[in-house]
Amino acid sequence: MKSKTFSMAAQLKKGKAAEKDFLERYGQGAIVRTDGRKGDLQVKWSRAIIELKTDFYSKSTNLFMERWSVEATPEREGKVGGPWQSIAHGASYYLYWFPDTEELFVFSTATLVEYLEANLNGFRPCPVRNKGYTTLGYIVPKEKLLKFHEENPDKKLLVPLDEVIFFK
């Protein structure tokens, strides 16, 4: 079976539309768009940066955690992606949203990266072909993230959205 090649332009367009939808549903006037270079959204009052990942595979029991937006090759240097890129951009929160089902995970970016780094060998790598490059991510079961959160509440892997918007 031939794997699908994704178009960055098409994916970006879909993501921008989802950002607009997210702001209408959850922003409550407290979250605004940024220029997108260092995070997608920002909490007005705290200035906290938010990265919003939208996933349209709503029946999935997993999250796709992008590690490299462009995987390194002998000809090309790799570009960090996903929550790792969000850390580099100063994003306090990494939101993972399934628009079709309204399922939303609000992660502390630093705690998420710490968890992923400690457990990366236990996740299945998943290369995604794009035109001219490959993205590399990992398939992370939702249940593992939820279990870690429940067993380690002091780590604050998951944060209530209201806490991000109003009470930080």
Image (spheres, rainbow, N blue to C red):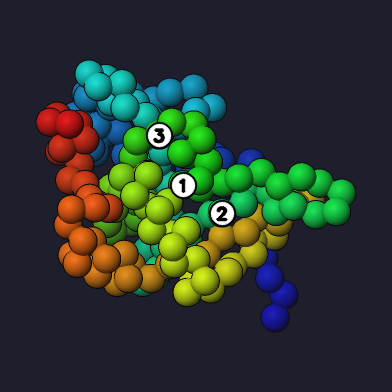
The mark that comes first in sequence, 3 or 2, is 2
Q: Are marks 3 and 1 in contact (CB under 8 Å)?
A: no
Residue at image point 49% right, 66% down: 120
Question: What numbered label is drawn on residue 83?
Answer: 1
Residue carrying label 2 = 67
Find the distance from the CA under tag 3 to the CA under tag 2. Answer: 16 Å
Where residue 67 sits, quadrant-wise, is bottom right
Look at the image and tell me in which quarter the N terminus lies: bottom right
Look at the image and tell me in which quarter the C terminus lies: top left
Find the distance from the CA under tag 1 to the CA under tag 2. Answer: 8 Å
Location of residue 60 in the rendering, given as x and y in whole percent from the top left corner: 39, 70
The mark that comes first in sequence, 1 or 2, is 2
Pick whichever, 46 or 5, lies toward us.
46
The local crowd at label 3, few if under 14, some if 14 to 19, many if 20 or more residues have their Cα within 10 Å, is many
Find the distance from the CA under tag 3 to the CA under tag 1. Answer: 9 Å
The local crowd at label 2, few if under 14, some if 14 to 19, many if 20 or more residues have their Cα within 10 Å, is many
